[in-house]
């Protein structure tokens, strides 16, 4: 007797917001194919690991999860195993040799094609889809993890060649979506009740460089700033965020637009990676710490209260103690609201991985701890400005640690908790008076 129960799928996502957006698109395809979402990867009939290769530990974790699923598959032949994302793109066929139980290995550019690729698997093929393709305009409908806030991709890929980064190898060249397609997706989201949209790109300031056309003054007519003006008035979308910015292309015109457009949130995520010019040059970042500081000064001139977050790498090959001190000095001077920090991790296929002056794990760990200590001190100082202020909070959920509280984010992206009933407040913008400040979150009471 054959079972007619719907097949169940599980997706585990590692890494960045781009991967989360890709996972939502793949979930949308599986929903449309009649699969049901399953929380437990060991109860699912189809398991997708959407992988990240930025750091070695994320990659190792994937292999340990895969090992367990491979054992399951040896007992249950109808389990379908998929590795998607950046590790899949980087390893390709090698993954099949390492884990022969895999059915499908697919790079990030193929997220939209999951349905077609699974059909090939059902015909008995082991499939590797890592060839570069032109990303057709998105016709897939993502299954969003939230029904208040949504990601919208505006540009795929990256043309930068930072010496430590594997992204251009795995996500391909820059491909911008048309302004019309982006606006249409935002209008659809607004009609479904979404209030907040985060526009996404690996290097969002590069948006539009590959689209045809320029203005009579000779300026390209499709910059990211132009896109913000074009999509800003979508009715129903109350908040617009964007990430990730690159200091090399970040313009004063963009900052002015953010100051002028009321829906654009006062939060900028601009990775600086190092505060030392020699290290920035070795990283092929294309700017100096002086240029980075000028960007921060401009933001604080136009939007004094804006939150600024960033990414930093310590112990890059050849980094001296003095060069590391320059990073600490930048962090101390700027007073970031939040900083994602990492010790340098050599990635296969990147120039820096082959350099001889790699630093020891002890140095990496010591510098990371010192930077993190400074970050939490300066973020706590920066948080003080919220005390006794009234902030607009968009309620996203219940506080998992205290059921009497709800939580949401301020326009500056601070996580904020306050007492309230989730049934009544979910999806509402609430005025909250801040009564307690911490380095990375706030507590307040409803006004």
Image (cartoon, helix red, strand yellow):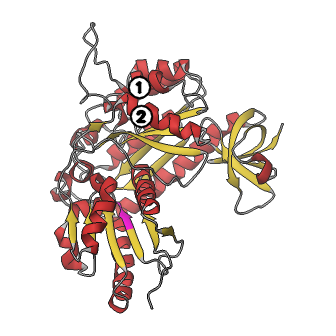
Q: Which mark is residue 294?
A: none
Query: What segment carries the magenta color?
Result: 49-53
Residue 237, horizontal then vertical, whole percent: 58, 33
**Taking 401 as reference, is 7 left or right?**
left
Viewer-closest of 408 and 328: 408
Residue 44, horizontal then vertical, whole percent: 46, 77
Sequence order check: which comes first, mark 1 or mark 2?
2
Is residue 53 something one can see in this rendering? no
**Taking 442 as reference, is 228 left or right?**
left
Q: Is residue 229 above or below residue 65?
A: above
Whether pointer 1 and pointer 2 mark residues with C-beta atoms closer than 8 Å, the reply is yes
| Magenta stretch, main secondary structure class | strand
Q: Is residue 59 above or below residue 25?
A: below
The residue to which callout 2 is attached is 182
Residue 33, horizontal then vertical, whole percent: 42, 63
**Taking 123 as reference, is 401 left or right?**
right
Instruction: Tell me if mark 1 has few (under 14), some (14-19) or many (20+) residues whose alpha carbon lies within 10 angstroms of its own.
Output: some
| Quadrant in which the N terminus appears | bottom left
The residue to which callout 1 is attached is 227
Q: How far apart are the alpha carbons under marks 1 and 2?
A: 9 Å
């Amino acid at each position: 007797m054959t079972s007619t129960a719907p097949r169940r799928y599980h997706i585990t996502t590692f890494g960045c917001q781009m991967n989360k957006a890709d996972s939502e698109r793949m979930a949308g395809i599986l929903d449309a194919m009649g699969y049901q979402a399953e929380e437990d990867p060991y109860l699912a009939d189809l398991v997708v690991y959407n992988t990240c290769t930025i750091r070695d530990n994320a990659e190792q974790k994937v292999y340990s999860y895969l090992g367990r699923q491979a054992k399951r598959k040896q007992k249950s032949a109808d389990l379908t195993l998929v590795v998607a994302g950046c590790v899949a793109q980087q390893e390709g066929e090698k993954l099949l040799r390492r884990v022969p139980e895999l059915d499908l290995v697919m790079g990030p550019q193929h997220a939209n094609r999951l349905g077609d690729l699974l059909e090939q698997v059902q015909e008995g093929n082991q499939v590797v889809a890592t060839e570069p393709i032109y990303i057709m305009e998105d016709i897939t409908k993502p299954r969003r993890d939230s029904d208040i806030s949504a990601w919208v991709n505006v540009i795929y890929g990256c043309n930068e060649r930072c010496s430590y980064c594997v992204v251009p190898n795995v996500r391909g060249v820059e491909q911008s979506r048309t302004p019309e397609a982006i606006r249409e997706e935002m209008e659809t989201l607004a009609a479904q009740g979404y209030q907040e949209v985060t526009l996404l790109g690996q290097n969002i300031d590069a948006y539009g460089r590959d689209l045809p056309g320029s203005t009579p003054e000779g300026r390209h007519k499709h910059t990211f700033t132009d896109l913000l003006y074009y999509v800003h008035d979508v009715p129903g979308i109350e908040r617009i965020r964007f990430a990730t910015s690159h200091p090399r292309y970040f313009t004063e015109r963009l900052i002015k637009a953010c100051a002028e457009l009321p829906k654009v949130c006062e939060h900028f995520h601009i990775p600086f990676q190092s505060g030392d010019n020699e290290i920035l040059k070795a990283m092929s970042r294309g700017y100096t710490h002086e240029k980075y500081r000028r960007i921060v000064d401009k933001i604080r001139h136009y939007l004094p209260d804006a939150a600024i977050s960033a990414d930093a790498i310590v112990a890059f090959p050849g980094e001296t103690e003095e060069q590391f001190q320059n990073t600490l000095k930048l962090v101390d001077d700027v007073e970031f609201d939040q900083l994602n920090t990492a010790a340098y991790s050599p990635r296969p296929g990147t120039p820096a991985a082959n350099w001889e002056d790699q630093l020891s794990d002890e140095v990496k760990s010591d510098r990371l701890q010192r930077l993190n200590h400074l970050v939490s001190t300066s973020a706590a100082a920066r948080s003080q400005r919220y005390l006794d202020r009234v902030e607009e909070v968009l309620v996203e959920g219940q506080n998992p640690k205290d059921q009497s509280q709800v939580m949401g984010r301020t326009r500056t992206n601070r996580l904020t908790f306050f007492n309230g009933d989730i049934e009544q407040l979910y999806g509402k913008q609430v005025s909250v008076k801040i009564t307690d400040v911490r380095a990375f979150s706030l507590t307040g009471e409803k006004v």
